[in-house]
Amino acid sequence: MLKKEFLKSTPAAKVTFTLAQSAIKGAKEVRVLGDFNNWDWEKAPVMKATKTAYTATIVLAAGKQYEFRYKADNGIWENDWDADNYIAAPYDVDNSVVVVPAKKGKATSKADTTAKPKKAAAPKVAAKKKAAPKKTTAKKKAPKKAAKADDLRKVEGIGPKIAGLLNEAGIVTFEDLSKAPIKKLRTILDDAGSRYRMHDPKTWAAQAKLAAKGNWDKLKAWQGELKGGK
């Protein structure tokens, strides 16, 4: 999660980065690495650990966008899933993006003193008409509500763009993904172009099955051994 606070004295903003502790387990230290520190662990700020999250505040120049990710001392990387955008990076991953717009002054608006036109009076009815007989129609059953979509990006190897491709193909929940044949998943990736053909979906259904059952600890432990879903 990102929070931005513009500084008055300089064209920059204090950006507070927040990562839930549940996103990275077994870490003693978590840092924010990105364009603003040349992706250097030694230069990256150590995030302060609270009971529920890790936080760090960095001053960034306005009018720019920066790629970043979170990294733990145990080697685990994690994205910010509330970032402003995502950009494809090497090694089959997407980097999170924080956008710090150019500072703009507040627009001032004058009160509207124009008199509002009066509503025209409704025309008088010359004579009462007999009410038309009520039509008797069979009650229609309310359509079933669509299943609530899950965040498929929690499956290792699936980024925002691939999640969008899966949603377009009718795969919107962890249960949908757990039942999807690998042949269908490969077809979705192949049809999307050469950029997506390199992705390997062979573990996606198994990961989604754990997510659908709420086995997050088991899933996270397994994901620590995977690279891009492999």
Image (cartoon, grey):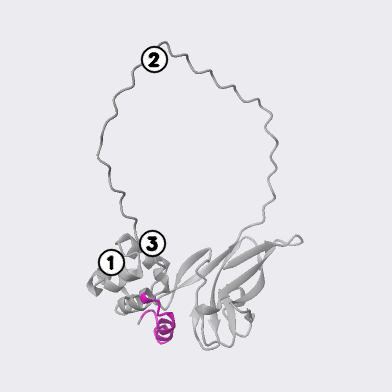
Q: Disc 1 marks which residue?
A: 188
Q: Is residue 8 above or below residue 207?
A: above
Relative to the observer, which residue lies in front, 225 or 137? Answer: 137
* First of labels 3, 2 by sequence position: 2
Q: How many marks?
A: 3
Residue drawn 35% across and 75% down? 208
Q: Do tag 3 and tag 2 residues touch (Cβ < 8 Å)?
A: no
Q: Position of residue 156 (x, y in %)?
A: 40, 77
Q: Disc 3 marks which residue?
A: 148
Q: Disc 2 marks which residue?
A: 128
For the C terminus, which image quadrant? Answer: bottom left
Q: Is residue 177 above or below residue 45?
A: above
In the image, what residue type sits under mark 2? Lys
**Between marks 3 and 2 in the image, the one whose residue lies nearer the viewer:** 2
In the image, what residue type sits under mark 3? Lys
Residue drawn 30% across and 61% down? 170
Q: Which residues are magenta?
A: 213-229
